[in-house]
Image (tube, grey):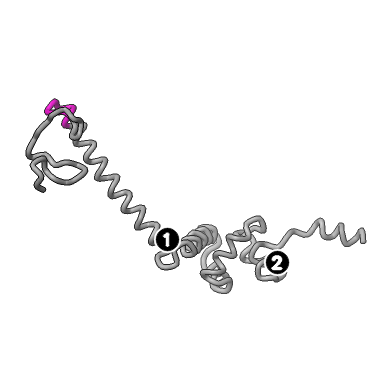
Amino acid sequence: MAASSSSSSFSKPPCAACKFLRRRCLSGCIFAPYFPPEEPTKFVNVHKIFGASNVSKLLNEIPAHQREDAVNSLTYEAEARLKDPVYGCVGAITILQRQVFTLQRELDATNADIMRFASGTGAPRGSGSGYDDPNSTDYWTGKGQDGGI
């Protein structure tokens, strides 16, 4: 009994992939460096979306120095696919691109206000200063002060 407890204290736990697949984790396991036993959901998500066999083939085909990046990409895509089965990470990218576009327009408008204020031609739009330029466009509605576009 003492011999069995001492031998188990020196064995390392199987990686998350081998544990999930219920197989013995060998020293050359392709999954072990990228799916540690402390992160079981990482492999489960990747397995649900891509399959263990496909991930194993992919990791064996790419150079060792690129495998960690590949696993990180697979993990991100798998999590995105589970959250949004139709668009996956493309949906997240689209949302972020829209936010960048909106913020860029807001930044451009703010910079224009700063330039107008700094040049002394008037107060920034929407300041309530009474600045009444019929050619100016209201930032929030996109309409001129006369109601037209």
Residue depicted at 54% across the width and 65% down the height: 46
Q: Say which amino acid is labelled 2.
A: Cys
Q: Which residue lies furthest to the right in this view?
A: 1
Disc with the residue nearer the chain's start (1 vs 2): 2
Residue drawn 45% across and 67% down? 85
Residue 8: which numbered mark, if any?
none
Within 10 Å of disc 1 (Cα), the crowding (few <14, some 14-19, many 20+) is: some
Q: Which of 99 and 34 is in front in this view?
A: 99
Rendered location of residue 71, percent (x, y): 53, 61
Taking the image as shown, residue 14 lies to the left or right of residue 116, namely: right
Image vertical order of residue 108 relative to residue 41, above or below: above
Residue at image position (70%, 63%) is: 14
Q: What residue type is labelled 1?
A: Cys
Q: Residue 29's image quarter?
A: bottom right
Query: Residue 16 occupies which quadrant of the picture?
Result: bottom right
Q: Which dot marks residue 25? A: 2
Magenta region, residue range = 116-123
Image coordinates for residue 136, horizontal then vertical, percent: 11, 39
Where is the N terminus found, in terms of image quarters?
bottom right
Horizontal side of residue 65 vs 26, given as left or right? left
Residue bearing the label numbered 1: 89
Rendered residue at 13%/29% (across/down): 130
